[in-house]
Image: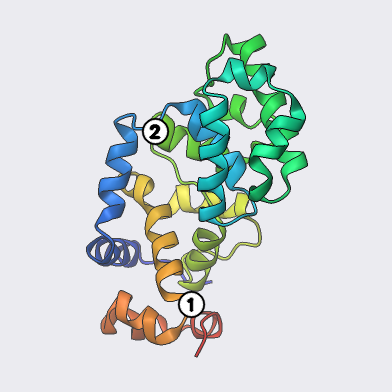
Amino acid sequence: MAKLDRREIEQVIERLLKQFPDCREEVMLWAEGREPPWRVLIGTILSQRTRDENTAKATAKLFSKYGSIKRLANAPLKQIEKLIKISGPYHQKAHNIKKTCQILMKKYKGQVPSLYEELVMLPGVGHKTADCVLLYGYGRACIPIDTHCHKISNLLGWIKTKTHEKTREELLRIVPKRHWKVINCLFVSLGQATRYKRTLFRGYLGEKLYYKYAKKKQFLNGLKS
């Protein structure tokens, strides 16, 4: 793999910030405490393996009935399952939510830990969920990795990774820290807006950047004609 020119990263991020200015504003709003960490935690668990609209419906139902960690910890499992059914694998998610809230009550006095190493020990919490809590719940600089972030960073040839965990490690190494908070939002926005179609990708990246990356085989192969 050729040595990465760090200026490429800056160019892409600056271009995408112009295309998706809401990403900067969204991260700033979250960092100001728009949602408490426990709601970010539960909401992110619910978002796993489902669509955004299903997550929104499930969280609205769940939080309207159980508005605190304590109430969720004491809620009947069947009732949690019923409320979040639209979110996909609801049996496992309900179990993880209830168990996590019980641990938070017992071990953390009803608070969500602010350390990555402690977050990933909670049921149903992997690297992405932990980073989402740190970024959107505590305003910390980190990079949550989802399908879009993993795919696009590999398409661009910034990294060559097989797993989300390795992608996280590599992006933390190569992306300037001042951009950590926005990179996930930018790549998610790009993936959703283009649906990985070449013509749409070209429009968002701009002609100069697009044709620069089009010289890379994995870039064009990863896009739809």
The residue that disc 1 covers is 196
Q: Which one is earlier in the sequence, the residue at label 1 or at label 2?
A: 2
Question: Residue at 77% of width from left, 40% of height from top?
Answer: 91
Eye-nearest disc, 1 or 2: 1
- SS at badge 2: loop
Question: Residue at 47% of width from left, 27% of height from top?
Answer: 37
The label number, if any, that marks residue 131 in the structure image: none
Question: Residue at 69% of width from left, 26% of height from top?
Answer: 98
Cα separation between marks 1 and 2: 30 Å
Residue closer to the observer: 51 or 144: 51
Residue closer to the observer: 79 or 158: 79
In this view of the protein, can residue 77 be seen by the observer? yes
The residue that disc 2 covers is 140
As drawn, 184 above or below 70: below
What is the x, y in percent for residue 186?
37, 59
Q: Is residue 91 left or right of residue 153?
A: right
Give the colour scheme shown: rainbow
As drawn, 154 above or below 88: below
In this view of the protein, can residue 122 be seen by the observer? no
